[in-house]
Image (cartoon, rainbow, N blue to C red):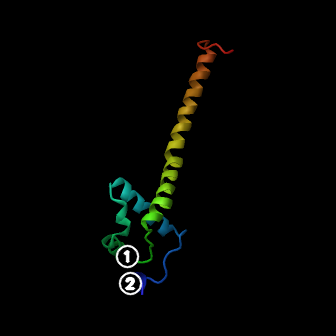
Amino acid sequence: MSIIDFFGGGTSYSKKDFVQLNFIEDLVLHVCKGYQSISIVESSWLRRLVMKRNPKVKFPTRIQFVSKHLPNMVAKTVDRYMLFLLTKCEMQVSLSIFGCLEFGMIHSS
């Protein structure tokens, strides 16, 4: 008998379920921003706390957390914030160079 059956939650969420994805994202943020040890994902106390609220969520193992969920969150963060900033900087540099060319400050060859 699993803990899900014990709490009467029925079947677990699928890997692509919105609630499950949000839980994983929140767990990654909790570990990273809260300076928690990765071992917290296997903490029986955290599992108990979460399972009482929502018994359908699935906890990742440490290996899944490090090899899949953490890199996914890094990629998502880079896509969401870093690429936007880099594109914005690139546009500003391009405009600066164009302005210098236009006013004769830089001679093109």
Residue 61 rendering spot, x and y as whole percentages: 43, 68
User: Which quadrant would the C terminus be assigned to in this image?
Assistant: top right
Label 1 near label 2: C-beta < 8 Å? yes
Callout 2 environment at 10 Å: few (<14), some (14 to 19), or many (20+)? some
Residue at 56% x, 27% y is 93
Residue at 47% x, 65% y is 64
Q: Under tag 2, what secondary structure?
A: helix
Residue 18 rendering spot, x and y as whole percentages: 51, 67
Picture layout, residue 97 above or below residue 48: above
Picture layout, residue 74 above or below residue 103: below
Residue 48 rendering spot, x and y as whole percentages: 33, 75
Callout 1 environment at 10 Å: few (<14), some (14 to 19), or many (20+)? some
Residue projecting furthest to the left: 45
Circle 1: residue type = Met
Circle 2: residue type = Phe
Picture layout, residue 80 above or below residue 27: above
Residue at 56% x, 37% y is 87
Horizontal side of 109 relative to 12 (left or right) equals: right
Picture layout, residue 44 above or below residue 25: below
Q: State the residue position of label 1.
A: 51
Residue projecting furthest to the right: 109
Q: Under tag 1, what secondary structure?
A: helix
Mark 2 to mark 1 CA distance (whole Å): 8 Å
Q: State the residue position of label 2.
A: 7
